Amino acid sequence: MKKRYVLTGLCICLQFWALAQNIPTKTYQFASKPSWADEFNKNGLPDSTKWNYDVGGHGWGNNELQYYTEKNLKNARVENGVLIIEALKETVKDNAYSSARLVTKGKGDFLYGRFEIKAKLPEGRGTWPAIWMLATKQVYSNTYWPDNGEIDIMEHVGYDPGRVHATVHTRDFNHIKGTQRSANKMLPDFHTAFHVYRVDWTPDKIEAFIDNELILSFPKVSNRWEEYPFDQPFHILLNIAVGGGWGGLKGVDESIFPQRMEIDYVRVYPLKSAPKKK
């Protein structure tokens, strides 16, 4: 209860700060029906009209240990109404693990909206599942990340079981500088029960929720893209990384694999009267 009071007070302070900066505020609404969704009702490979694959290994910039495969049922498949992304202990092209990273880029690119993903997470030291969003195009500067932004709807590192994070990265606010905007919530049953991870994204702010509880608010407080580059289309990514700078901070327990993330649905509700895409 104390944390909830602190969060509420912080949100109120940020709102007053925005008003003091003469930044207009507006109440936004989202459509009641999704404009894009995957309910995972057909067994087999993920729907190719909605999902692409990021493929490869050797670190992904975070010293990760997995190789992301493509169209491999062992690593990404639909079974009994859920999408399963599974990390395996096996050597693939000199990488010690295999996994999958599904992306909607080119098949689901969104400017603003409500993004809901119902998921059950893997467990164990060394796992690093993520449900997140990246800019589809490089609009700002000559550096794609973090200048064009990142929205982490859900991240979990297995050495800290149950602490589920939501985070926003920009040029001014990112983990390299230690200035990222982040919050977390404890979910003791993160690996045995499904929870709904959600982001509401509007021209004025990004808010993250777990099971409809607000945990993070990131308001736009200036027109500088370095602070808020979130005025361009983004796409969704789903993956399990193994090890890495954060996920492997306390090593990897090789005995826990295979590990899977199960996703019941992905739903995108458009913002009513949203600005046109660039």
Image: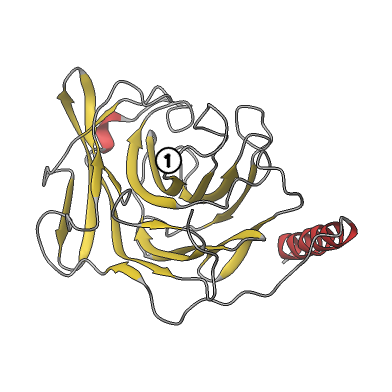
Among the 4 quarters of the image, the one containing residue 37: bottom left
**Residue 231 shown left or right of residue 73 in the figure:** right
Q: Is residue 90 above or below residue 217?
A: above
Residue at which label 1 appears: 158
Among the 4 quarters of the image, the one containing residue 240: top left
Residue at the extreme right of the image, as rendered: 20
Residue 149: horizontal and vertical position, in percent?
Answer: 55, 42
Mark 1 lies on a secondary structure that is loop
Question: Dot 1, crowdedness within 10 Å: few (<14), some or many (≥20)?
Answer: many
Instruction: Give the residue type at disc 1.
Output: Gly
Residue 258: horizontal and vertical position, in percent?
Answer: 21, 41
| Viewer-proximal residue among 169 and 230 | 230
| Viewer-proximal residue among 173 and 120 | 173
- Residue drawn where x is 67% and y is 61% of the image: 204
Give the position of the N terminus as an image quadrant: bottom right
Residue 128: horizontal and vertical position, in percent?
Answer: 40, 39
- Residue drawn where x is 54% and y is 69% of the image: 274
Residue 44: horizontal and vertical position, in percent?
Answer: 9, 57
| Viewer-proximal residue among 55 and 242 | 55
- Residue drawn where x is 38% and y is 29% of the image: 243
Count of all numbered marks drawn on residues in the image: 1
**Residue 218 shown left or right of residue 75 in the figure:** right
